[in-house]
Amino acid sequence: MNHEPYLAYEFGVAILAPWQQACLASLRTISALSAPLPAAMRNACAAWELLAALQVSGERPPFRLSGGDTREEVVCSLPFCSLVRFRRGAGGPPVMLVAPLSGHYASRLRDTVGGLLDGHDVYVTDWHNARDVPLGQGGFDLDDYIDYLLHFLRRIGPGAHLVAICQASTASLAATALLAEDDDDVRPLSFTLMCGPVDPRISPTAIGRFAAGTPVTWFERCMTTVVPPGFAGVGRRVAPGFLQVPSFSRNESTERFSALLQSCAGLGVWDRAQIEQARHGYLDELSLLDLSGEFYLSTIRQVFQEAALARGRLYWRGRRVRPEAIRDCALMTIEAAEDDVCGPGQTHVAHELCSGLPPALRRRLTQPRTGHVALFNGRTWQDDVCPAVRAMIAERGGDPKRPPQDGEASRPPARPLLQTAPL
């Protein structure tokens, strides 16, 4: 068993913890001095306190959604993911938000959830940390990912809309195609794909080129390891979250981190409120989950190296996925012009694959001067992208068939899932 990378990381965290706490205590003592400190020094102390507190965590941060009447409940729990429903007031047509399984927790999409919450019941795929899934629960690969989406759509029932972020776009398109080909009544009325690598060969980014040009054996050897004792998933091969930090988009963090360093130097760029806001942002960025090794490697191979979906060679349980079978599910694709993770055209190509869709059911949006994360988080999402998504959903409307309510039976998945536990 190759536990060394995990054990080395955990040992390093344990060694640094006392020094980190001592540094934090010193900074807080300085900030609490009775003698008034100059504003620049107070800001510098607060900024250094933030830097001292930064560390990678394997725990999911809370969603922290604003609005006192927002309700959060788990409606279905499977070994590698829970389906979480958010409701506010009377709710509305259901929207399933498929969070990417690429290292961050679904709670990073709180802005996305908040934007869709008014007027909708929002269901979120809350992916679990693979290190916490016992080995006896079985493996999890791209086929299983699609299984989960099919199961969750059946749990929600007819009349749902689907919104997929980033890496989730490929599996979401595949699940929609399978349901459409079967004329299944739980196929989504609309599906929105945002900044996802439907065909990563188009305008390849540095991340995509590296994934496509490096042997899978290298990723298995260098980017996966075995969970050591001390975690529920001991013995499971995973792609650890702490090894994935360098592969994430850096564009959205550069300006913020530069301002933080200036504040550390006492230049007074940030006030305390801005530093507290940054603390929550870094908490999300550094809260990382481990991916199942099977899923990580199958994604590298089938999505980035083979471009299987775009080439008509993606199979689910031995059945070919046919996007051209989608004929009545409205499609919207959204891209960021300055995306350093998913290049321009990689998501819009879904319209070519879904050749059976009439023009009236197609929408495209390219957001100028926007990076990857800003597309679904912050002012760009709130002011430009979210209104477009909501408008498209409103055009498609709802379905007269009522989705199943709490406690009602939902249609079982086509292939039984291990340890299915509806709540």
Image: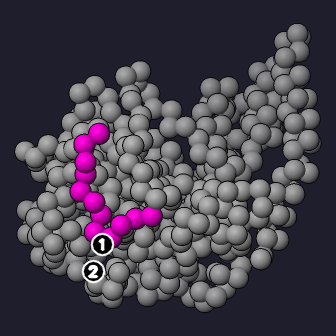
Mark on residue 251? none
Q: Identify the coloring.
A: one colour
Which residue is located at x 87 percent, y 57 percent? Answer: 11
Residue 416 vs 117, above or below: the answer is below
Quarter of the image holding residue 180?
bottom left
Residue 259 vs 334, above or below: the answer is above
Report x, y in % for residue 5.
Answer: 79, 69
Q: Quadrant of the C terminus?
A: top left
Which residue is located at x 66 percent, y 27 percent? Answer: 271
Is residue 379 visible in the rendered image? The answer is no
Q: Tags 1 and 2 in contact by the CB under 8 Å rule? A: yes
Label 1: which secondary element: helix
- The amino acid type found where label 1 is placed reads Ala
Stretch in magenta:
407-418
Mark on residue 174? 1
Which residue is located at x 28 percent, y 52 percent? Answer: 155
Left or right: 313, with 40 as reference point:
left
Per the model, the C-alpha gap separating discs 1 and 2 is: 6 Å
Report x, y in % for residue 307.
Answer: 40, 84
Q: Quadrant of the N terminus?
A: bottom right
Residue 201 vs 250, above or below: the answer is below
| Residue identified by numbered label 2 | 321
Magenta segment includes 138: no
Quick one: label 1, few (<14), some, or many (20+) residues within 10 Å? many
- The amino acid type found where label 2 is placed reads Val
Residue 314 or residue 387, whichever sits in front: 314
Quick one: label 2, few (<14), some, or many (20+) residues within 10 Å? many
Label 2: which secondary element: loop
**N-terminal-most mark, 1 or 2:** 1
Which residue is located at x 84 percent, y 12 percent? Answer: 36
Residue 37 or residue 401, whichever sits in front: 401
